[in-house]
Amino acid sequence: MSRSRLPALLAALLLSSALAAPGVRARPAEAVLPATTHDLAGHAMVAAANPMAAEAGLRVLKEGGSAVDAAVAIQAVLGLVEPQSSGLGGGSFMTFYDGKTHKTVIYDGREKAPAAATPQYFFGPDGKPMGFLNAILSGRSEGVPGAIASLYVAHKAHGRLPWASLFTQAETMAREGFPMPQRMSDAANSRIPMALTPDSTAYFSKPDGTRYHAGETMKNPAYAATLKRVAAEGPAAILTGKVADDIVARIHQEPNPGVLTKADLAAYQPTVDAPVCRPYRAYVICAPSPPGGGVGVLEILGILESTDIATRGPADPQAWLEFAEASRLGYADRDHYVGDPKFVSVPVQGLLDPAYDAARAKLMDTAGAAPGQPPFGAPAAATTAGIDHTAEPGGTTHFVIVDAEGNAVSMTTTVESVFGSGRMVDGFYLNNQLTDFSLSPTDPQTGAPAQNAVAGGKRPRSSMAPVIVFDKRPDGSAGGFVMAIGSPGGNSIIAYVAKALVGLIDWKMEPKAAISLPNIVARGTTVSVEKGADPAVVALLKAKGLNVSADAGENSGLHVIVKTKAGYIGAADPRREGVAIGY
């Protein structure tokens, strides 16, 4: 699918966002907020996309649980109250910092393609890639879910409370009822195709055939039963046995049945990996390595390090032009070179080499017109790769946690599109993560394979970029914990996180002000500018010849916790219904 069609498709698939908060004056990030502010905590803090989930995580922390314990409880509740974004049937990336050993590790719960998948997995009977929406709604879009398996491995290493105890609140809510959140209601009552499938219609309809709306009590006894199994058996409850049978049966139904098997499910193992880190200003920023989105965020920041963006501030349109141009160059490289490193060679070190990024910065056309497709570069160790044809909508969520021992979690978790594939089993939605692969496996002009082409057992490329930031020691290594941050938003995640880091680090803004800055996402030939942004920014971008999509619905869901001398300051994106709470 051409990128020129992608904005219109995403507009049809995704919910529109609330307005950003323009014009917020910057204050130093280390400023002490009033003691009555709800997002200042002395011991521990949670920031998550739904108040009920955040409260579940905080309860675990108050009971002596670790940040990973709280993550398990939060994910269990989010799967119930935010099924449009994540759940038991999805995947995740977690960046974890151990406050005692000072080590950082990535828990990669990214979904995998079935062993029988081929590069032509998403081809139709005509021998051409099927339409993107048809691919989402097909049985071929589901990958092996990995979020629960990844949390289980992380809990074995860093949990303090019993695994089974962490599902109690979510199970009770599912069985006894919970008030339908507004965002869940908006999604369920939209015209998004995944909300109109037979499974969605059955779940969101009352006995009289009308649909549930915000504030009304919903129950999900099937989800409660599944959680009970997960509490007792761990990920085996999903990857083997009855639930696995149900997943396979549903995936093999029309239209376009998939080929995933029980053997694929049973064989799944999450990946535990080192993060990819790089210095930026006086800090070190760590995020998931490929196939995660960390490289994209870090390269954009590396390019910006050669600019004067830090001296300009958020009120200067030229600063946003610099951000847009750096984003376009960073995305060009990321889209071309990043794939699953177990299958393709990804030039991570080349992409993050300061000399390479400085050379990329010289291509930033901030003085004249730059309307065309930005070129991808030639970093060290790069191999020949074809043009990528990947679309990536954003049914995703993010949360951050810091516990009383100083352990930190930044976790992005997803079912991919809104309500995933629109198919449900046992109270939860199945993902459509395999549509994160390039539906066309080769460059039609050169025949070169795309880095992100489908292959059996391969993980699709992701934009998920849960970040943890540290002070930089004199030798350039990571020092003490500074902040945890991340966002949902499909391929826009990279720009959302980079924007917030610029606000926090370069412009020294308070967390709430930084994440509330208007979202400007520049990828390919289009710059998407959020409704509510300064008209002078739009005018400058257009004057430079860029293809600007103004008043766009850029629906970030940034969550951040920053460590200060007064304690932890947390913030939740005002575009969604999240909160930051602590004690």
Image (cartoon, grey):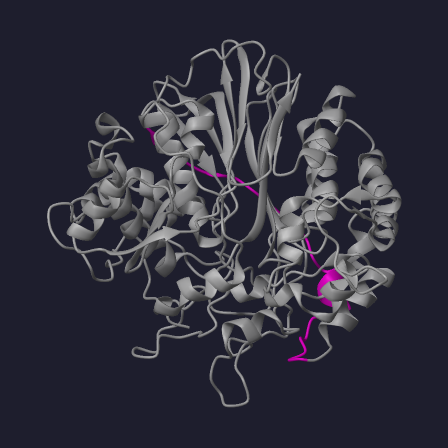
Numbered marks: total: 0
The residue located at (80%, 28%) in the rendering is 161
Q: Is residue 328 left or right of residue 210?
A: left
Q: Is residue 100 above or below residue 503?
A: above
Q: Position of residue 128 (x, y in %)?
A: 47, 84
Horizontal and vertical percent for residue 195? 65, 63
Q: Against 559, is 342 above or below?
A: below
Q: Is residue 569 left or right of residue 367?
A: right
Examine the rendering and report whether any part of residue 436 can be seen. Answer: yes
Query: Is residue 429 on the magenta stretch?
Result: no
Q: Where is residue 362, by image quadrant? A: top left
The residue lying furthest to the bottom in this view is 126
Quadrant in which the N terminus is drawn: bottom left
Q: Which residues are magenta?
A: 255-280
Q: Which x, y percent locates residue 338?
A: 41, 56
For residue 143, above or below residue 36: below
Q: Residue at x 43, y 38 (%)?
A: 20
The reply, left or right, for residue 399 in relation to residue 173 is: left
Task: Please tell me which residue is depicted at 67% across the width and 57% down the height of the picture.
Answer: 188
Location of the C terminus by quadrant is top right
Can residue 285 be seen here? The reply is no
Of 1 and 510, nearer the camera is 510
Residue pushed farthest left? Answer: 368
Q: Is residue 115 left or right of residue 483?
A: right
- Name which quarter of the figure residue 405 lies in: top right
Estimate the x, y position of residue 545 in percent, counting from the top left. 17, 56
